Image: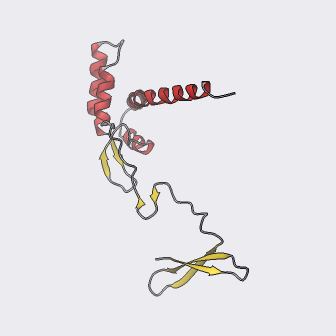
Amino acid sequence: MATIRNRIRRDGTASFQVRWLQGGRGGSWESERFGELTAQQWPYGWVPGQGFVEPEQDPDDVPLVEWSRHYVERLTGIDKRTRDDYLCEVDRHVSLFVHTTRAGLVMPATIGNITADDAQDWIRRPAAPKSIANRHGLLWCVVQAAIEPLLIGATRFYEDAMRSRVR
């Protein structure tokens, strides 16, 4: 475990020494000096005092399969056979989609927790290139339909803010 030692220089400024035992018991002490402690940069997902923490879940988050079925059932301009084929794709393939946390925990995918890595793992399942392209296209449309209202709302907020700005 590392320790931080505060060192006062002759001119009165502080420097900090981080010391640790390299290699555990029986190892040698190593150290590194820093001019100031305020220049800390934590890795993404690191919460000081808690470690790597997953972001809190959105209470309005929806399971991916449920949202996908909702999206397909609301499509317009397609015949019944096409809708049934899409629903079959959702049941057979989108239902296999899972989310893996940074800690390695595998959990059900929701529209708010899926990542590009999850999509890569899902797409890698053996299939013909055309089938993979079709599944990827369906997933893209489902996710686009979920985030589009958020993007439109943000754009309108920005436009209203720009209109009301004093010149």
Q: Nearer the viewer, residue 92 or 24?
A: 24
Q: Residue at x 37, y 51 (%)?
A: 101
- Quadrant of the drawing holding the C terminus: top right
Q: Nearer the viewer, residue 157 or 134?
A: 157
Can residue 93 be seen here? Answer: no
**How is the structure coloured here?**
secondary structure
Q: Residue at x 37, y 48 (%)?
A: 56
* Residue 103 versus residue 144 in the image, above or below: below
* Residue 118 versus residue 23 in the image, above or below: above
Q: Quadrant of residue 19?
A: bottom right
Residue 46 placement, left or right of 89: right
The percent position of residue 58, horizontal first and vertical second, equals 36, 41
The percent position of residue 144, horizontal first and vertical second, equals 43, 29
**Furthest-right residue in view?**
11
Residue 89 placement, left or right of 51: left
Q: Quadrant of residue 110?
A: top left
Can residue 57 be seen here? Answer: yes
Q: How many marks?
A: 0
The percent position of residue 31, horizontal first and vertical second, equals 58, 79
**Furthest-front residue in view?**
166
The percent position of residue 139, horizontal first and vertical second, equals 39, 31
Q: Residue at x 61, y 63 (%)?
A: 39
Q: Residue at x 36, y 36 (%)?
A: 111
* Residue 107 versus residue 17 in the image, above or below: above
